[in-house]
Image (cartoon, grey):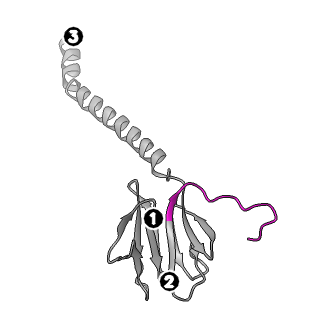
């Protein structure tokens, strides 16, 4: 009877480290998933600022920003030199990435033509056709009371 009990116990003994390993693996994966989920959506406050006749227009940036003339873009620019879907500015892996979407008049960063996706930083001047925008940190200033939108 005692030998039979010890025999059953010894048969399941090798499975105990396996279950402990699988439990530790699941806890580690769950913690990593939670940390990535929490940090993934945090993008820094940033804006694209356009200077027109001495007055600035600022556009608050989201994680993914489509820029162009079409009404469904995140940032709409009513300028005929800008294509309907001109460029995409997105925050990925801790950096702002700019990509031309096959626009007619091209996209330039600091006067260099954009041929492939490029990391842009604060202070870079982005030219979409004939429109110049500057990438800046922070939120756009709230409009003054009584100012037109």
Given residues 57 and 88, the one toward you in this image is: 57
Quarter occupied by residue 146: bottom right
Q: Nearer the viewer, mark 2 or mark 3?
A: 2
* Residue 137 on the magenta segment: yes
Given residues 147 and 9, the one toward you in this image is: 147
The residue that appears at 19% across and 25% down in the rendered structure is 11
Q: Which mark is residue 90?
A: 1
The residue that appears at 54% across and 54% down in the rendered structure is 45
Of mark 2 and mark 3, the one earlier in the sequence is: 3
How far across and down, in percent of the image, does residue 35 sit? Answer: 43, 42
How far across and down, in percent of the image, does residue 60 sit? Answer: 58, 62
Q: Quadrant of the C terminus?
A: bottom right
Quick one: SS at disc 3? Answer: helix
By secondary structure, the bulk of the magenta-drawn segment is best described as loop
Quarter occupied by residue 80: bottom right
The residue that label 3 is drawn on is 2
Label pair 2/1, CB-CB below 8 angstroms: no
Q: Which residues are magenta?
A: 135-149
Measured along the vertical axis of the image, is residue 107 above or below residue 58?
Answer: below
Q: Nearer the viewer, mark 2 or mark 1?
A: 2
- Residue most extreme to the front: 54
Measured along the vertical axis of the image, is residue 54 above or below residue 35?
Answer: below
Q: Quadrant of the N terminus?
A: top left
* Residue 140 on the magenta segment: yes
Q: CA distance from mark 2 to mark 3?
A: 89 Å
The residue that label 2 is drawn on is 130
The residue that appears at 50% across and 85% down in the rendered structure is 83
Q: Nearer the viewer, mark 1 or mark 3?
A: 1
How far across and down, in percent of the image, does residue 33 sit? Answer: 41, 44
Quick one: SS at disc 2? Answer: loop
Q: CA distance from mark 2 to mark 1?
A: 21 Å
Label pair 2/3, CB-CB below 8 angstroms: no
């Amino acid at each position: 009877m005692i030998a039979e009990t010890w025999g059953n116990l010894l048969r399941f003994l090798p499975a105990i480290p396996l279950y402990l390993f699988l439990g530790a693996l699941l806890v580690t994966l769950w913690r990593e998933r939670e940390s990535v989920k929490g940090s993934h959506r945090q993008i820094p406050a940033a804006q694209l600022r356009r200077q027109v006749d001495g007055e600035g227009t600022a556009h608050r940036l989201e994680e993914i920003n489509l820029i162009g003339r079409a009404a469904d873009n995140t940032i709409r620019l009513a300028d005929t030199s800008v294509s309907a879907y001109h460029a995409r500015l997105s925050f990925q892996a801790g950096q702002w990435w700019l990509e031309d979407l096959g626009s007619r008049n091209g996209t330039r960063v600091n006067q260099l033509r954009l041929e492939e996706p490029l990391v842009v930083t604060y202070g870079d001047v982005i030219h979409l056709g004939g429109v110049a925008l500057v990438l800046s940190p922070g939120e756009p200033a709230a409009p003054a009371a009584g100012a037109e939108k």
